[in-house]
Image (spheres, rainbow, N blue to C red):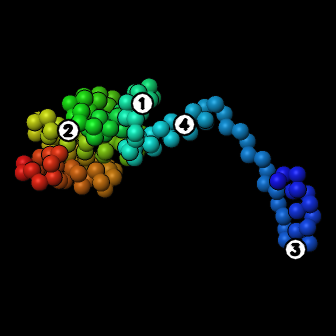
Amino acid sequence: GVDELAAVRAALEPHAQVEVPARQPELSEAAMREVRERSLLDVAMRGDVEDPAGLLGQLRALGTPEAGYHEANILLAHGHAAEALEKLVSVATGDFQEPYYLPGFVLARLGELQDLAGDRQAALRAYRGVLALDYAPPEAVETAQAGLERPFSLSPDAEG
């Protein structure tokens, strides 16, 4: 272990340059909070959680646009399309420009949820919004293009 470091260093020095790394500085409370938030958002993005209620509560407490987007996705995945739509409408009416990829995903999902709710005109506006962005992730662009061609449906073989 650490107690043997000096002996190991002495044995290796004739054969190799040995550098002991400097001790890493401890993270500030703000940095630790940021790491915890990013971890929570990453778990939510994967969506494969055993306790969606607990995760939804943590995302609500976080209160960021990205957390709201993930909250809507989890709600939709668990059969709560109307609640997901309500959540995404609240995200889309606020400032959701960060992180840079979020607007494309929010608008693409919003279009899908509006299609599910039967509001085709609002869905088309959302899909066109994705395509009007300076940058949208390729997945969001594909979703928007598909949504413009036919209304989104949860059943893959349903006709518009």
Q: Nearer the viewer, mark 1 or mark 3?
A: 1
Q: Position of residue 104 (x, y in %)?
A: 30, 45
Q: In the rendered image, which quarter is residue 123 located in?
A: top left
The secondary structure type at the circle numbered 1 is: helix
Hey, which residue is sitting farthest left in the picture?
159
Estimate how packed mark 2 is, as few (under 14), some (14 to 19) or many (20 or more) residues with alpha carbons within 10 Å.
Answer: many
Label of residue 15 in the image? 3
The foreground one among 21 and 79 is: 79
Classify 64 as above or below 4: above
Residue plotted at (40% across, 39% down): 50
Q: Which residue is mark 2?
A: 113
**Marks 2 and 1: in contact by CB < 8 Å?**
no
Q: Earlier in the sequence, mark 1 or mark 3?
A: 3
The amino acid type found where label 1 is placed reads: Gly
Answer whether residue 59 is visible to the viewer in this image.
Answer: no
**Marks 3 and 1: in contact by CB < 8 Å?**
no
Using the numbered discs, state the Cα–Cα distance from disc 1 to disc 3 in whole angstroms: 54 Å
Answer whether residue 74 is visible to the viewer in this image.
Answer: yes
The secondary structure type at the circle numbered 4 is: helix
The secondary structure type at the circle numbered 2 is: helix
Q: Which residue is mark 1?
A: 54
Residue plotted at (56% across, 39% down): 35
Horizontal side of 27 relative to 160 (left or right) equals: right
Using the numbered discs, state the Cα–Cα distance from disc 2 to disc 4 in whole angstroms: 29 Å
The amino acid type found where label 2 is placed reads: Leu
Q: Which residue is mark 4?
A: 36
Q: Position of residue 98 (x, y in %)?
A: 41, 39
Horizontal side of 146 relative to 9 (left or right) equals: left
Label of residue 93 in the image? none
Using the numbered discs, state the Cα–Cα distance from disc 1 to disc 2 in whole angstroms: 23 Å
Horizontal side of 122 relative to 64 (left or right) equals: left
Using the numbered discs, state the Cα–Cα distance from disc 4 to disc 1 in whole angstroms: 15 Å
